[in-house]
Amino acid sequence: MVILIRYGEIHLKGLNRPQFERRLKDNIKIVLKEFKGINIKRINGRFILFGFDENYIDDISEKLKNVFGIHSFSIALETDKDYENVKKESLRMFWDAVNKAGAKTFKVAAKRSDKSYKFDTMELIRELGGYLFENTNGISVDVKNPDITLNVEIREMAYIYTDIILCRGGLPVGCNGKAALLLSGGIDSPVSGYMTMKRGVLIECIHFYSFPYTGELAKQKVIDLCKILSGFGGGIRLHIVPFTEIQKEIFEKCPNSELTIIMRRFMMKIADRIAAANECSALITGESIGQVASQTLESLNCTNTVTNLPVIRPVICFDKQEIIEIAKDIDTFETSILPYEDCCTVFTPKRPVTHPNLERIVNSEQVLDTETLIKSAVENTEMIVVKG
Ligand code: ATP
Ligand code: MG
């Protein structure tokens, strides 16, 4: 058995194709690294995965489905393209599928990149269809709506399969630059990370950590979220920024109603620094218009002005329910709703401003030694490499 991987060549326009393929191959290897012996070869516009222990084929398929850049794949028999072999292996695969699916009807589909093959595509379909029909009792041909389609591809070798498993599409993570994701422990920011990764962007995660107000479990939750995200295309680096000092200073010295907005501005300033040090060309957040006081348009304006980087907000116009649906689909939801405190919930103002005035906020910040606070937080940031 091998796995035949298709990666949507149509979408390759304008992208550097060798780079795209190299990335995808590396990402597949990283995501599947726990399965010993796996190897990948490329044959005209497809990858063939081979060398794995077939007992793990279901686990491998589950992981492969998530890797961005893969359009679909099939679990296939690879055989010499001598027609006698093709016949024999096709019948074997056919019977397996019939027994599994309890099929009553079938058709044959064929592709041929080897133009010197003794049959052209139509002839091959006819020959093989006839052979299978003769060797099966009670199973008839239905070209419109068959229970089973037996596919044969004649390339350097012949590939025979019945199922095409559709994947998430997107672009291989890392082929479209790098951005820093402000990752809380909530529902929205992991979804934003996922959506940006889908466009081929490698993410570097930043978490603001308020020890001892938030504990080891809250930190572990963020590491677990990074692990899930890494399943879409390789390892992720997580920067854990000590945030308690900054929050205490803001809490003691600034107007209570402005706590959240000033805190969010600090997060963006620190993220901007970490992004610069790690070659990230954008920031990503899980903000959504009007979801909370710190996400009104006026609030977004106040937090946006502290950075010159583009801020990607993939869920900005999504309802919470829409975000939750994606979180469930990508398997972050159950982790996100674990009840550990987030740094924002520890220092929550009693009556937060919903329409902050930028000048007033900047003025309120004057009492803080912003540069020293930021420098110390960045210097004491811990970096963890998270692998799936
Ligand atoms: P989420 O579900 O992503 O936590 P939220 O609805 O709780 O979002 P806020 O707490 O206002 O919203 O945070 C808005 C955004 O700010 C988050 O989506 C995230 O990008 C960033 N953020 C908030 N808290 C943190 C944190 N502790 N560490 C890193 N980023 C954070
Ligand atoms: Mg949050």
Image (cartoon, grey):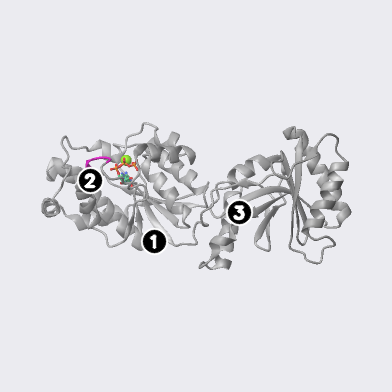
Residue positioned 22% across, 49% down in the render: 297
Looking at marks 2 and 1 on the same chain, the residue that comes earlier in the sequence is marked by: 1
Proximity of marks 3 and 2: CB atoms separated by less than 8 Å: no
Q: Nearer the viewer, mark 3 or mark 2?
A: 2
What is the distance, in whole Å, between disc 3 and disc 2 at their CAs?
42 Å
What residue is disc 3 on? 29
Q: Is residue 6 left or right of residue 68?
A: right
- Disc 2 residue type (three-letter): Thr
Residue 98 magenta? no
Quadrant in the rendering for residue 202:
bottom left
What residue is disc 1 on? 278
Task: Please state the quadrant of the image where ligand 1 appears.
Answer: top left
Q: Nearer the viewer, mark 2 or mark 1?
A: 2
- Disc 3 residue type (three-letter): Lys
Q: Tag 2: Cα neighbours inside 10 Å, few (<14), some, or many (≥20)?
A: some
Quadrant in the rendering for residue 333:
top left
Q: Position of residue 229 (x, y in %)?
A: 47, 46
Q: Is residue 111 left or right of residue 83?
A: left
